[in-house]
Structures are given as C-alpha cells and as structure tokens.
Image: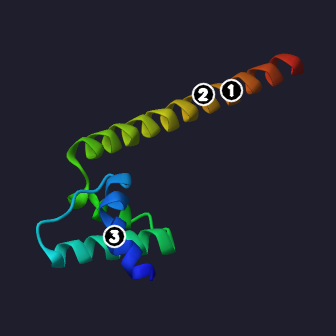
Amino acid sequence: MSKAVFDLYRATLAEALGLEFPPTQKAERNMWELVSRRMTFRLSEDVKSLDEFRKKDDLQRSDQSAKTRALAKKSEAIENEECSRHNKERKNYAGD
C-alpha cells in the first residue's frame, strides 16, 4: 500500500522538496535513495549530493541561504569578540 501511495504522489513529494525528476529511471531511483538516506540518517554530507536533482532556482536560493548563514556566523563571532574585549576593559577599569 505504501509503495502505491509513494508512486502516486512522488511527483508531489519531489516538488515539495524542490527536486526535478531526472531523465532516467536509474537516476530517479538514485535520487530517492539519497532522499531516503538524508531523511533517515540526517547526514549533512548528503545535502550536496542532491544538488544535481534540485530545481535550478531552488539551488540558487540554497546557495544564498548558505552565504547568509555564513555571514551571520561571522557577524556573531565578531560581536562576541567585541563583547569579550569590552568586558576585559571594564574589569581593567574597575581594578584601577
């Protein structure tokens, strides 16, 4: 029963995941195996392995999101460094 439901709605699922159907049945099977492994084991290294199946506009958004996260992380590190420096200055001033 679950296989029939999957077969019936696999296009809807692929659309929801931002994936395009590959040209061959073998490639599609590979895509679903990667999706299954990603969902089951939460393997972050499998994220990039799905790129060949992603819709091109979703891939661009994904790249932009990654850049945004990297900038946010860098900004947070700078802010933490500035807070540490400020706290040290306050301690030094209080100690004088």
Residue farthest along the right direction in this orientation = 95
The mark found on residue 83 in the picture is 1
Is residue 4 depicted above or below 51 in this figure?
below
Q: Is residue 63 left or right of residue 87?
A: left
Badge 2 amino acid:
Glu
Whether the residues at callouts 1 and 3 have beta carbons within 8 Å, the answer is no
Q: Nearer the viewer, residue 92 or 71?
A: 71
Q: Is residue 69 left or right of residue 31?
A: right
Q: Is residue 64 left or right of residue 85?
A: left
* Residue visible at 31% across and 42% down in the picture: 63
**Residue 44 appears in which quarter of the rendering?**
bottom left
Q: Say what secondary structure mark 2 lies in.
A: helix
Few, some or many residues within 10 Å of mark 3 (<14, 14–19, 20+): few
Horizontal and vertical percent for residue 96? 87, 16
Read off the residue under disc 2.
79
**SS for dot 1:** helix
Give the mark, 1 or 3, whose residue is nearer the N terminus.
3
Image position of 56 (left or right of 8): left
Whichever of callouts 2 and 3 sits on the residue coming sooner in the sequence is: 3
The image shows residue 21 at horizontal and vertical percentages of 20, 62
Label number found at residue 8? 3
Q: Residue at x 33, y 77 (%)?
A: 33
Q: Is residue 37 visible?
A: yes
Give the amino acid type for the residue marked by disc 3 in the picture. Answer: Leu
Q: Quadrant of residue 54?
A: bottom left
Considering the image in quadrants, where does the N terminus appear? bottom left
Q: Position of residue 66 (x, y in %)?
A: 39, 43
Label 1 close to label 2 by CB (< 8 Å): yes
Q: Residue at coordinates 32% horizontally, 52% vertically from top-left?
A: 18
- Residue at 47% from the left image edge and 69% from the top image edge: 39
Between the residue at mark 1 and the residue at mark 2, the CA separation in whole angstroms equals 6 Å
Q: Secondary structure at mark 3?
A: helix
